[in-house]
Amino acid sequence: MSRAVLSLGSNVGDRTAHLQTAVNSLGRTVRAVSSIYRTPPWGGVPQPDYYNLVVIAEDDGNDAHAWWERCQALEQEAGRERTIRWGPRTLDADVIVVEVHGHAVISDEPELTLPHPRAAQRAFVLRPWAEIDPTAELPGAGAIADLLDRLDTSGIVRVGHVR
Ligand SMILES: Nc1ncnc2c1ncn2[C@@H]1O[C@H](COP(=O)(O)OP(=O)(O)OP(=O)(O)O)[C@@H](O)[C@H]1O
Ligand SMILES: Nc1nc2c(c(=O)[nH]1)N=C(CO)CN2
């Protein structure tokens, strides 16, 4: 049994539709979906605001890599083209944390680093995650509520929900 926290973001095209399609594709694995938040672009590249949400998903397998493959498939389904790092995209799907049988997977592989190495600095991840799991911990970094207290969340606005 594995449980994953996934971050989905879009800032090209119909942002809500891209998020909706991705959540639909995750199908029966989905256990919780946050609201959609409009978030200022993180990373210094000038670009439109993103729509972001966080999904908690579970399946019977024990393979953290399978969550990464699912995220890659979601990005491909959205027609994502790789251009600039931290630049605009139809869909950004990141694996934030994976737990197998209740234990966090730690990985420093470049292809799948876990927990996601930049999650603690990203209010666009922590804000939606805190909505659906307020007492969550980011392994190695602490309680997400405490991490969020240290970040600027002033530009983050809840704009809706997927169906
Ligand atoms: N936890 C993870 N979730 C998703 N991708 C990861 C993770 N760890 C490593 N990667 C790798 O990061 C590579 C770059 O991913 P991507 O192009 O989505 O980067 P990015 O979204 O611009 O930046 P960031 O990695 O900071 O979110 C991917 O090829 C992927 O294999
Ligand atoms: N607010 C926000 N900023 C980002 C996002 C994202 O999903 N939301 N994804 C990025 C891709 O690396 C870069 N910057």
Image: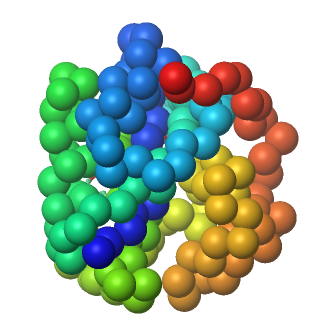
Check the image and report above or below for 58 versus 63. above
Where residue 107 sits in the image (x, y, percent)? Answer: 28, 83
Q: In this orientation, does residue 116 appear? A: no
The answer to which image quadrant residue 23 occupies is top left
Q: How many marks?
A: 0
Residue 38 is left or right of residue 29, and the answer is right
Q: Position of residue 84 (x, y in %)?
A: 30, 37
State whether residue 131 is above or below residue 139.
Answer: above
Q: Residue at x 64, y 47 (%)?
A: 128
Camera-nearest residue between 78 and 63: 63
* Residue positioned 71% across, 51% down in the render: 131
Quarter containing the N terminus: bottom left
Question: Residue at (41%, 88%) from the top-left corner?
Answer: 103
The residue positioned farthest toward the top in the image shown: 14
Q: Is residue 34 above or below residue 110?
A: above
Q: Is residue 44 left or right of residue 127?
A: left
Q: Please state the horizontal and vertical placement of residue 112, each as a whole percent of the image.
A: 24, 68
Q: How is the image coloured?
A: rainbow
Residue 139 left/right relative to 109: right
109 and 30: which is toward the camera = 30
Query: Residue 68: x percent and y percent?
Result: 22, 58
Q: Foreground residue, 59 or 74?
A: 59
Residue that appears at 18% across and 28% down: 77
Whether residue 134 is visible, yes or no, is yes
